[in-house]
Image (cartoon, grey):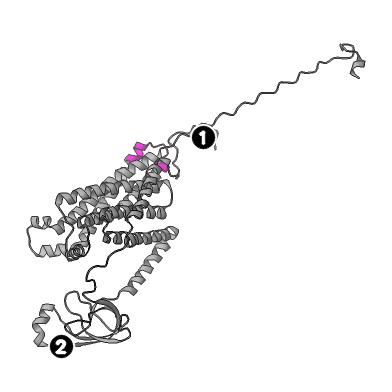
Amino acid sequence: MNEDAANQPMHSHAVPNDAVPRAALWILVPAAAATILGLILLWPSGVADAEAIDAYGTEVDGHVLAVHETECDEADAELNEQLQATVCGDVVVRLLSGEHADEEAIVDIPSGPGAPVVEVGDDVILLHTPDSVSGQQYHIIDHDRSSALWALAIAFALAVVAFGRWKGLRSLVSLGITFAVVLLFMVPAVLDGSSPILVAVVGSAAIMLVSLYLGHGWNRTTTVAVVGTLASLIVTVLLAEAAVNLTKLNGVLDENTTNLALQYPIDMSGLLLAGILIGALGVIDDVTVSQAATVDEVAKANPKWSSGRLFTSGMRVGRDHLTSVVNTLVLAYAGASLPLLVLISAANRPLEQVLTSQLVATEIVRSVAGTLGLIAAVPITTWLAAYLARRNPQPKAPKAPKEKPKPKPAPEAAAWDEDESPYPPSHLR
């Protein structure tokens, strides 16, 4: 280090470090405490079983041993046409679970729209109905995909770890915790009668705090992303609630939501809000992490840039990122609703009726509320990251050490000889 650099005074444009700023802890610590308290208060005490849950039978596993196709009986032509049955015959299945495990059963070949096509060697799921009017107790309803899904899950985990290494492993652990929060807390708590929106807020906060810090570490950039995500989630909840109330959506959209509302005391409009919030969380935390990391890297590369200039630069990146993410969010909702869109298009209904129907209006509200939450996330996170990147708290000036009293110099002995001494030499002996 040269002398000029050594003598250069420290100022506020120094390169930022990765320490978590104390100012952010004033928001982070109360939020974490409120999340833990919410988990304790809303934790489900016990979920009642749905009424008549086994009215349609119980599911058992089976393995296809043989398939025998035959020509359909002409006497049943009208019934087969109604059921859209194109193949007739029977299937021999070895039962792998249930009260008749290890036994063989003969069932009809599945038929109708969406019926599974079975072959010898397939693992299938059967519905056991002992009181069936037709006398046939077993019916094939689906393929058993557990082996295929396990293979895909293992391939996914290996790819993530191979590419991300230690961070990839931490992201997998984070993903597991996310599933645990959703399946062990959020879903049972909603079924237990708790407010869906409160459950969603608490569960989303828990997922965010754990997953972001576990995946990205305890540092200033992650803390900025956490605070930005928390603020954006609050904005999203308020906007989504206003949109749902304005459009008068009740959350009962199809047969599944109708059955859920009949069997459990659930606020369906609140459940709709919870779904909007959870769906937006995954995209919002992606935006906040990206913005916080971008501003941090720009601040380190340009140590003389002020907070205002960092904010302007970060917003330029954020606008480009926001454009692509909004398109991704809308396409995700459209992809999930594609069968509905095709059905509506085939009905040749007027566009105004299509857009104002509850099914389509719900998807519009999801997209709009999620997009507004994303738009809010960009400036909030960018400003917070730019401000903290240039916020260097002034250290306390060290106290000046007390000066020790200088010792008095000893008086110099005067040079004298025996003739000049005031005392006789005998006195010195």
Q: Which residue is mark 1?
A: 5
Q: Quadrant of the N terminus?
A: top right
Query: Which amino acid, by three-letter code, is at mark 1?
Result: Ala
Q: How many marks?
A: 2
Q: Is residue 351 above or below residue 224?
A: below
> SS of the residue at dot 1?
helix
- Residue 105 shows in the view: yes
Residue nearest the observer in this picture, 220 or 316: 220
- Sequence-first tag of 1 and 2: 1
- x, y percent for residue 30: 37, 45
Q: Which residue is mark 2?
A: 71
Q: Residues in magenta? A: 299-311
Tag 1 and tag 2, C-beta contact below 8 Å: no
> SS of the residue at dot 2?
loop
Compared across the picture, whether 422 is left or right of 412 comes to right
Residue nearest the observer in this picture, 226 or 336: 226
Main SS type for the magenta part? helix
Residue nearest the observer in this picture, 133 or 356: 133
- x, y percent for residue 405: 66, 24
- x, y percent for residue 85: 15, 80
Q: Nearer the viewer, mark 1 or mark 2?
A: 2
Q: Quadrant of the C terminus?
A: top right
Whether residue 420 is in magenta: the answer is no
Compared across the picture, whether 152 is left or right of 110 comes to right
Q: Residue visible at 42% across and 62% down?
A: 161
Q: Residue visible at 35% across and 42% down?
A: 384
Query: Which amino acid, by three-letter code, is at mark 2?
Result: Glu
- x, y percent for residue 162: 42, 63
